Every structure is written in C-alpha cells, then in structure tokens.
Image (cartoon, grey):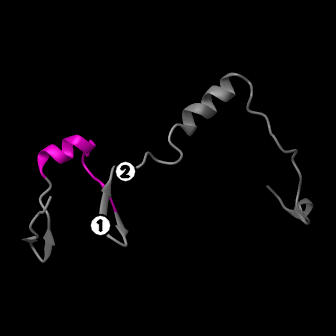
Amino acid sequence: MKAALRRMGNSQGVIIPKTLIAQFGFEGEVDMQVTPEGIMLVKPQEHVRAGWAEASQQLAAAGDDGLVWPEFGNEGDEGLAW
C-alpha cells in the first residue's frame, strides 16, 4: 500500500486509513520505532510495572509481605540519627 506524504505545518505526515487503525487496534497514541527498513508503528506496551500496586496489596493482605533478604546495615550506620 502506498501513501502520499502530506505537509502538516512545518512537518510532513501520512494519513493512516481508518480500516488499518481499527485492524491493529490503535487508540490515542502509537509507538514509533525506527528500523533499517523505515518507520514501524506499534501499539504502546503496557507499563512495565502495571499491576504492581494491586499485587503488593494482595501480598500484604495475605501476610506474605515479609523481607526476603535479612536486614543488614552499612558501615557507619550506627553513627546516623534517623
């Protein structure tokens, strides 16, 4: 499929047909990645830490939120006032 570059202010752009937007499920924004062959548009990935807050609340509610590593101090900690 070919698409014409169109002037958009001081830039140029491509109009993406509505059917392609629907086919790939694009909504609101896309991630643009530069590849050796050109530009690739992909759906943004979910935030890496999405769901962490809820998962930690579930761990706390289950009483399974204890330390995995034992507490240990650093050299000189005893002279610090908290």
**Residue for point 8% across, 67% down:** 4
Query: Nearest the camera: 59 or 10?
Result: 10
x, y percent for residue 36: 37, 73
Q: Is residue 1 above or below residue 8?
A: above
Q: Which residues are magenta?
A: 17-32
Q: Is 53 drawn above or below residue 34 in the view shown?
A: above
- In the rendered view, does 19 fall on the left or right side of 79? left
Q: Is residue 53 magenta?
A: no
Q: Quadrant of the N terminus?
A: bottom left
Q: Whole-percent x and y of residue 38?
A: 30, 70
Q: Which residue is mark 2?
A: 44
71 left or right, relative to 34: right
Given residues 23 and 68, the one toward you in this image is 23
Name the one closer to the observer, 38 or 44: 38
Which residue is at 11% across, 63% downward? 3
- Residue 61 in the image: above or below residue 50: above
Q: Position of residue 17 (x, y in %)?
A: 12, 51
Contact (CB < 8 A) between labels 1 and 2?
Answer: no
Q: What element does badge 1 sit on?
A: strand
Q: Earlier in the sequence, mark 1 or mark 2?
A: 1
Q: Amino acid at mark 1?
A: Ile
Residue holding disc 1 = 39
Tell me the quarter of the picture where residue 67 sits.
top right
SS of the residue at dot 2? loop
Q: Residue at x 20, y 46 (%)?
A: 21
Q: Residue at x 52, y 48 (%)?
A: 48
Q: Nearer the viewer, mark 1 or mark 2?
A: 1
Query: Residue furthest toward the top?
Result: 62
Question: What percent of the width, then of the height, locates residue 63?
Answer: 74, 24
Magenta stretch: residue 19 in it? yes
